[in-house]
Each structure stands twice: as C-alpha cells, then as structure tokens.
Image (spheres, rainbow, N blue to C red):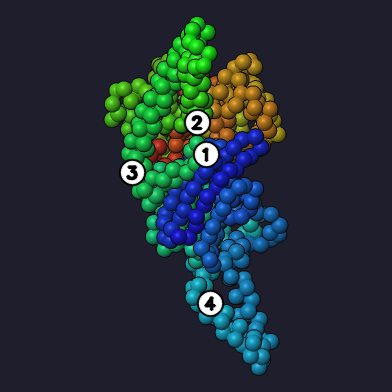
Amino acid sequence: MLLTVDIEQKSMGNKELFHALKLSVEAGEKVAVIGRNGVGKTTLFRMLTGEDTDFAGDVITRQGLRMVATRQEHHDLGDQTVVAYVLANLPEYAHLQHIIDTYPETMGDNMRKIEQYSEALERFTQLDYHTVEDRVRQSLADYQLPADMPMHGLSGGQKRLVELVRIEHSSADLALIDEPTNHMDYVAKAAFIDWYKSVKYAVVAITHDRDLLQAASRIIEIKDQAAYNFPGNYDDYLRQNAARTSSDLNEYETTQRRIANVKKQIQYARSKKSSWTGTADKKNPFVVMETRLLKEMAELTALERPSFWIDQESITDLKPTIADSYQKHKARTIRIRHGSQAERQRELLALENVTVGYNGKPLFAPLTKRVLTGDRIRLVGRNGVGKTTLIRAITDVANGMHSATLLHGVIITDTKLRINAYDQEVTDALLDMTLGGAIEHIYGLYDLQVSSERIMQLLSDYLFDPYGDHDQSVRNLSGGQKARLQLIKLFANDPNLIILDEPTNHLDLPSIEELEAALATYHGALLYISHDSYVAKHLGGEEVAIVTSPKQ
C-alpha cells in the first residue's frame, strides 16, 4: 500500500468538509477522484501532500514514497525558462546534476567525493536522467509549449500543462494531479490519456473529464463528507452508482416512513398519558412509550440525508417507483432557464473568407461558413490555431466593435442576432466585484434591469447560497463557482446564437449533464469548441476543422 488515509474530521470555517473519510492507494493504480464542486477535493490533495495539516486523523505513506503533485502557484521564478523549471523540479535532478557537473573539477583524490560522484552517476542512470532534457522538450512540444520561454510569460492554462510535463518525467511512486485535461486540445488530451493508462506508477487525478474517467481503474467519489469506492472505469461507476443510489433511496424512504409513523405514535402516547388511571406504584406506560419513541425519533432525525445523483441514461433503466423517488429526492443541479420559443429560421451569421491573426500574420487558412437558426457547429483544431481568437472576433463584430485580429474577409451578422459566449475565464472587470454586483453588472451590459429578487433566484438556480455567497468576492470563487457565474452570463440576454469555448472545464458531472440537457432543448444556434467526446456526442452537429495557415 502506497498511501492510507483516515480523516476523522476536517473543517473549513464553519463547514465540516470530511468526517470519517477513509481511502487508500496501491502501487500502479489509476485512480480518479470526483465530487460536486465545493466538497473539498483540492483540499484533500493538500492534506495528502502535507500542505494542509489542520485536521484530525492520519495520512500514512509507505516509507521512502516519492510523491509529486501539480502546483497551483508559480511565484519567485524570475526568468527561469520552462525547460529549466521542469528539470529543476524533478526529484533529485538538481542535486545529482550539481554533483556530476562540479565534482570532477574539485574531487581530486578525495575518496568521499569520488564515492559521492560514483553514487550520483549510478542514481542518475537509475532515474534515466541522462536523456531526460530531450524527452522533456519533446513533451513540451507535444503540448505546444515553448521550452525556452520564461515561465512568467505563460498563461495560466499553459502553466497547468507544464505541471503535467513535470509530473510525467518525475519517476515518482505516486502522482497527484488536479484537473489535468482542462485547456488541452484533442491531440494533447489523447497523449495524456495514453500516458495515464501506460505509466507504471500510481496516478490519482481530480477530474470530471469523462474521457479520462473512462481510462481509470478505480473512481473515488467524495460525497457526504466521506469517500466512496467504485472499482473500474466511468461506465462501471455509472452502473454501480445507479445501483447504490437506488438502495440508498429505498433505505432513506423507509426511514422517512418510520419517522412519520413514530410521530403519530408520539402524538398517541401524549394524548393518552394524562388520562391513565393506573396505580401510583406502576409507571405510566404511555410516558414510558413516549420516552422510548422520542429517543428513537432523535436517532432517526440525526441521520444525515444522503446526496442522490444518477445519470440520465441510467434513470431510464430504473423501476418506476425508484425513478419517482429519485426525482423527489435527487441532489440539486444547476437550473438553467432560457427562452424556449422557437424563432423563424434565419441566417444569423456569415463568415466570408475569414482569417484572424496578430501582427498581420494569419493563424489559419481562410474560412467560409454560414450559421442558421438551430445549427450545431463544432470547431476543431489544435491549441493556438486560432479557434478562441476567431470567437472573439465574431463577438466583437456582433457587438458593433472593431476587431483588431480580423485580418481578412468579412463577418456578417443578422440584424436580429442576439449573441452570447461562454468564455474560459472570468473577465478582469468582474474579479473585484461581489457575486451579486457581478450579476447586476452582467445584466447591465445588455441594458437589462435585474431586481434583487431575481439575483437571489439566479444564485439559487446556479447552486450558490443566495445569502452566504451574495457578497463573496468573484476573485475568491472556486473554479467551479466561476464557471457557474459564466453560465449565468451566457443566458442573461436570451441569445439566439450561443458560442461555447470548453464549457465543461471546472463543472462537476451533474452540472455538465444539466448543461447538456439545457442545450439539447435550446432552439437557437450553437457554435462550440470542446475536446470532450461526450459533449460532442450529446450536442452533435457539423464538425468544422480550423487548420493552420500555410503562410505561417
């Protein structure tokens, strides 16, 4: 066993995250960790690495375990290049390289240094570090990362990919990776999943990417303050989860029926105890009955209500009584309200020989495409080919703005076009606002009035606490919370053309399914970028390849 975890209790502020949480990881396992946004998955990782020690319980690792984890912050790196950063953070690399580079000039006949030098060479060979720089550079190229650029010049998404390269070449026993496939294109994602499946050491990944979940050997779900094990991949999880949730629903409803019955019996005992005419030497049986029932009621009501979620496909296979029970008790998911009135079909958008780029250099070959009401169009291409830049150019033109990146061609929009886009990141203008203020600002962008009651309703619909989160700073929201704020923005102006740029990043499985269900009933047009094969399957539509311009 590489790792054994027994968390008695862990709290964040007034919220208890974990209670009696137990899990373990064995050598070579490919484990995926899932759970609703906010249940504490990233906090759990910080506890495993020792960054967070404020909890009751134990994290026990095998002696000599080499554990590596992706970093969230990259400060004080100066002008350190990407390749230098990766190499410097490989286990033992910097120390061993220093000995190999410097000792030959200073060791002379010093036997202790000669032994250290020999041991360093042997260890360097054991870790296969002699050619590691070439392999690191190849991995960086696979992820389209500039090996010799300073780390401070990378975007947040690029730094996440650098962390994956560091993990891949770390020769660890156990790797902890948080949301690895966010920001990856289809080529990089396929390469990562191949690595994930074939690497010899254990990997534990927090992810809701269903393609990656399908490659896991075990799924751990963090739910109701505990960890639940599901052997196998995503398909296995769905089957086991449906069966387990059905059983939990039966048990919960049985408990609720017992509570209702006990309440009636308590009322009966209370109605009879005052009229009991027995002798003083005997206890009033109705008082005894009431005391026993009150104790049972306290035990029953102290039981925590479980969280219930079953995927839509599995629901269709449930018995009608279980399906009805599930709809009654299921866990809350985001509630997306959008206009359902179908519009007359029209040409909403036309691209005529369009290409975008920077400094006069086109990113992709000229594109001609028409988008009609009800169309579903998926843009496909490598990261950096210009998909997101094209989307920004379209939204700029649609909003009556000049697009500096539109180099050639014409973007024509219909006079009745209402367009909105789901962006990968919250705009800087919203970061220092409160959540409630950000929603009011978003509606103001479309010259729409939004009442305080409507804001509270939106917060509830999108799984925020209307009172606790209203004054929360947007900057301090989690990735999942920021993603849900982006969804509020997406539907604010009842658009008839929606543009989606990797919409499932940071969303949990129930919320992803809710988004897919909402978009399935959406009458407008969809133009979307997604490297999630499940999203492509659910949304469908025409696939349009964006290919690199031959002039690059």
Q: Name the residue under label 1.
A: 225
**Spatial CA span between label 4 and label 1:** 42 Å
Give yes or no for contact between labels 1 and 3 (Cβ–Cβ under 8 Å): no
Nearer the N terminus, badge 2 or badge 3?
Answer: 3
Give the position of the N terminus as an image quadrant.
bottom left
What residue type is disc 4 on?
A: Arg
Q: In this view, does 321 lie to the left or right of 414?
A: left
**Spatial CA span between label 2 and label 3:** 26 Å
Which circle, 2 or 1, is nearer the viewer?
2
- How far across and down, in percent of the image, does residue 442 sit? 62, 25
The residue sitting at 62% across, 15% down in the picture is 453
Q: Mark 2 points at which residue?
A: 304
Task: Work out whether residue 187 can be spotted.
Answer: no
Nearer the N terminus, badge 1 or badge 3?
Answer: 1
The residue sitting at 48% across, 60% down in the picture is 2
Give yes or no for contact between labels 2 and 3 (Cβ–Cβ under 8 Å): no
For the residue carrying disc 4, how many other residues have a C-alpha within 10 Å: few (<14), some (14-19), or many (20+)? Answer: some
Which circle, 4 or 1, is nearer the viewer?
1
**Spatial CA span between label 2 and label 1:** 10 Å
Q: Name the residue under label 4.
A: 123
The residue sitting at 36% across, 28% down in the picture is 250
Which circle, 1 or 3, is nearer the viewer?
1
Q: Name the residue under label 3.
A: 236
